[in-house]
Image (cartoon, rainbow, N blue to C red):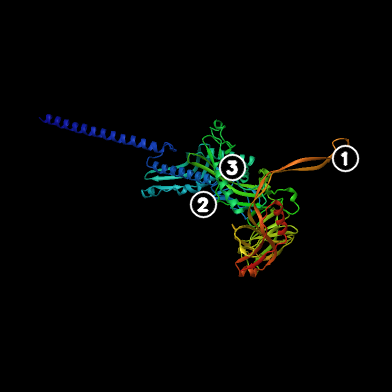
């Protein structure tokens, strides 16, 4: 009986142990399943990151956060570098000048982008193209500066102790990735677990290397062939009057502002149309490939070219008078009646300067850099070579060693601020700007050069000054006053077409009336001329004239100086003179500053001329014009 009970107890004990064993096995399976799932999750999270063998599981989340910070800082550095032409730490800023509008950086959407090529304010050609090793150093410095800012606040709150040592980064830029090796002690402690990790490595996907290579290809092609300048010259000749001849007897006029506005719009649109060769280029050879740039880029990359009229630019044209381009007719002057027709030749010389931003991209990743485009005298600038990059400055401007004090005043001896430059022979050097009317600066040495002063609202001033020794110069600048023009013809208000010029020894101003009805004048002696024109249907028939000249005898007689007469037929095409000189005159008048201060209107009364009915009448009007006077009244 007792034994049965014992067996029963034993059996009962064994059943309990068996039941407990089964529960333990189930628990073990659950734990194993959780570990497997957790391991899989951790694997997918950190499979692209560095894993440290033997790293305690409690510390792994902290280290994964650190690697995430390292990746993020690397990508941020790449993004900044790509948006700033290969720089994170920008080169020293150098301002432009009224003569060269480029500073060393282009402001693109509020972000400064260093030029790879530009011309400084004192006319020095400069390059600042970063090397790939320079860019690697830039990212290294960025990572070393930022990595210690990695946020571990949540871990600190949960009892972790984290200590960061001094970082030393090594970056390698490849075509499709950027690798970072970081040497820095990372000491992590949690409970009884402690780890010190010294070396860290991440590889991020980036096209930085490929985009940089493509950018260098385009830049080197530009410096070699000046393709952007050549496009600019084509645009200039297509959208602005450069040179040509038109058959007419009235002057041709263009407003400089309107010409420049058209140029700005054309440059902006045509620059945006440019593109580089792609894989389909050979298939599209039959198409118009005028806008395809002869520059290749890395596979899977493309490029675009941007310009904005809002960016710094400069447009200059000569000859011009008071913002107007004028070309006078030939053939209607006294003594030229033998021509039998009139024509207007014109030739204008332009200096054009503006930036182009080149963006090389692949997908959403963009590398960008700007270059300065310079057209001088209707021609592209000279290609920049190595020597020009080092010493492209005019020697005069390089050596400023004479200290000169320049003071600028108005006629009331009140200080005014002005831009100062110095001109010696054909070289002009920008010096600086007077502040409160004074500038103390070093000038290049020159005998009988000119100090030039420019200020808004004042006539440009020149001051003859030798800079061989220290001294000072006081420059008086004449204030400009805007005057409204009222034109009368034969004592009656005139609303037709006229050209009014104000010529002085300081400047020439030309007004195309009635499109323009105001002019800025300063005190001085002026020759004022008015030409009025009337609509005309004067028709000059087609004619043929014989022109004979003496040429050396083609035989033996040519040796002894004998000549033959050869005659040619010159065909003069039919033309209709739509505008004929109908009135005007000229007057020498000294304009006082008191007249400009006290009055706002200059009233000019001119005399009328007979309406021409033949070419002889037209020529006679130009003869009569020479004796016509003007009546000038300020009111």
Q: Going from the N terminus, do you reach mark 1 or mark 3 first?
A: 3
Q: Is residue 241 left or right of residue 557?
A: left
Q: Is residue 403 left or right of residue 173?
A: right
Residue furthest to the front: 613
Q: Whole-percent x and y of residue 253?
A: 64, 53
Q: Which residue is mark 2?
A: 110
Q: Going from the N terminus, do you reach mark 2 or mark 1 first?
A: 2
Closer-to-camera residue (632/580): 580
The residues bearing labels 2 and 3 have C-alpha atoms spaced at a distance of 25 Å
Q: Whole-percent x and y of residue 61?
A: 39, 42
The residues bearing labels 2 and 1 have C-alpha atoms spaced at a distance of 77 Å
Q: Residues within 10 Å of mark 2 (few under 14, many from 20)?
A: few
The answer to whether the residues at label 2 and label 1 have Cβ atoms under 8 Å apart is: no
- The C terminus is located in which quarter? bottom right
- The N terminus is located in which quarter? top left
User: Is there any visible trace of residue 417 in the rendered image?
Assistant: no
Q: Which residue is mark 1?
A: 562
Number of numbered discs on residues: 3
At a point 75% along the width and 49% down the height, the residue shown is: 338
Q: Whole-percent x and y of residue 602?
A: 62, 65
Q: Which residue is mark 3?
A: 131
């Amino acid at each position: 009986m007792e034994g049965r009970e014992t067996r029963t107890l034993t059996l009962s004990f064994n059943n309990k142990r068996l039941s407990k064993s089964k529960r333990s096995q189930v628990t073990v399976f659950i734990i194993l399943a959780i570990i497997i799932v957790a391991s899989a999750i951790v694997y997918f999270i950190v499979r692209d990151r560095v894993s440290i063998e033997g790293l305690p599981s409690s510390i792994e989340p902290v280290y994964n956060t650190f690697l995430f910070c390292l990746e993020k800082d690397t990508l941020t550095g790449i993004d900044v570098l790509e948006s700033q032409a290969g720089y994170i730490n920008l080169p020293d800023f150098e301002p432009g000048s009224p003569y060269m509008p480029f500073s060393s950086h282009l402001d693109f959407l509020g972000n400064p982008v260093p030029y790879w090529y530009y011309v400084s304010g004192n006319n020095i050609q400069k390059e600042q193209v970063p090397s790939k090793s320079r860019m690697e150093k830039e990212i290294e410095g960025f990572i070393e500066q930022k990595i210690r800012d990695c946020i571990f606040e949540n871990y600190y709150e949960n009892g972790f102790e984290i200590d960061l040592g001094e970082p030393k980064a090594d970056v390698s830029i490849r075509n499709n990735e950027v690798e970072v090796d970081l040497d820095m002690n990372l000491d992590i402690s949690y409970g009884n677990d402690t780890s010190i990790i010294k070396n860290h490595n991440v590889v991020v996907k980036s096209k930085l290397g490929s985009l940089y290579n493509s950018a260098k290809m385009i830049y080197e092609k530009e410096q070699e062939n000046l393709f952007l300048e050549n496009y600019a010259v084509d645009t200039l000749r297509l959208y602005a009057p450069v040179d040509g001849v038109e058959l007419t007897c009235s002057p041709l006029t263009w407003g400089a502002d309107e010409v420049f506005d058209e140029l700005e719009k054309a440059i902006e649109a045509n620059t945006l149309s440019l593109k580089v060769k792609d894989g389909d280029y050979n298939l599209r050879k039959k198409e118009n490939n005028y806008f395809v740039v002869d520059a290749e880029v890395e596979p899977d990359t493309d490029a675009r070219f941007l310009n904005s009229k809002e960016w710094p630019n400069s447009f200059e044209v000569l000859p011009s008078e008071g913002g107007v381009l004028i070309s006078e007719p030939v053939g209607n002057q006294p003594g030229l009646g033998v021509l039998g027709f009139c024509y207007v030749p014109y030739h204008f010389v332009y200096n054009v300067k503006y930036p182009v931003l080149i963006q090389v991209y692949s997908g959403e990743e963009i590398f960008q850099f700007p270059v300065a485009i310079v057209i001088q005298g209707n021609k592209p600038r000279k290609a920049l070579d190595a020597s020009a990059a080092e010493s492209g400055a005019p020697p005069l401007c390089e050596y400023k060693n004479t200290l000169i004090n320049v003071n600028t005043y108005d006629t009331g001896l009140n200080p005014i601020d002005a831009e100062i430059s110095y001109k010696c022979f054909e070289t002009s050097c920008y010096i600086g700007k007077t502040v409160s009317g004074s500038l103390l600066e070093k000038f290049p040495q020159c005998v009988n050069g000119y100090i030039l002063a420019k200020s808004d609202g004042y006539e440009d001033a020149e001051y003859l000054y030798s800079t061989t020794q220290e001294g000072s110069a006081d420059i008086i600048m004449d204030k400009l006053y805007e005057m409204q023009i009222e034109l009368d013809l034969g004592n009656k208000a005139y609303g037709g077409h006229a050209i009014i010029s104000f010529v002085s020894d300081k400047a020439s101003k030309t007004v195309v009336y009635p499109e323009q009805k105001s002019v800025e004048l300063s005190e001085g002696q002026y020759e004022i001329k008015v030409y009025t024109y009337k609509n005309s249907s004067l028709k000059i028939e087609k004619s043929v004239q014989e022109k004979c000249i003496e040429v050396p005898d083609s035989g033996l007689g040519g040796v002894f100086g004998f000549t033959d007469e050869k005659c040619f037929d010159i065909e003069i095409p039919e033309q209709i003179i739509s505008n004929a000189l109908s009135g005007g005159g000229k007057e020498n008048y000294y304009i006082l500053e008191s007249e400009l201060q006290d009055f706002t209107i200059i009233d000019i009364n001119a005399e009328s001329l007979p309406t021409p009915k033949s070419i002889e009448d037209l020529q006679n009007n130009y003869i009569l014009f020479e004796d016509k006077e003007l009546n000038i009244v300020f009111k």
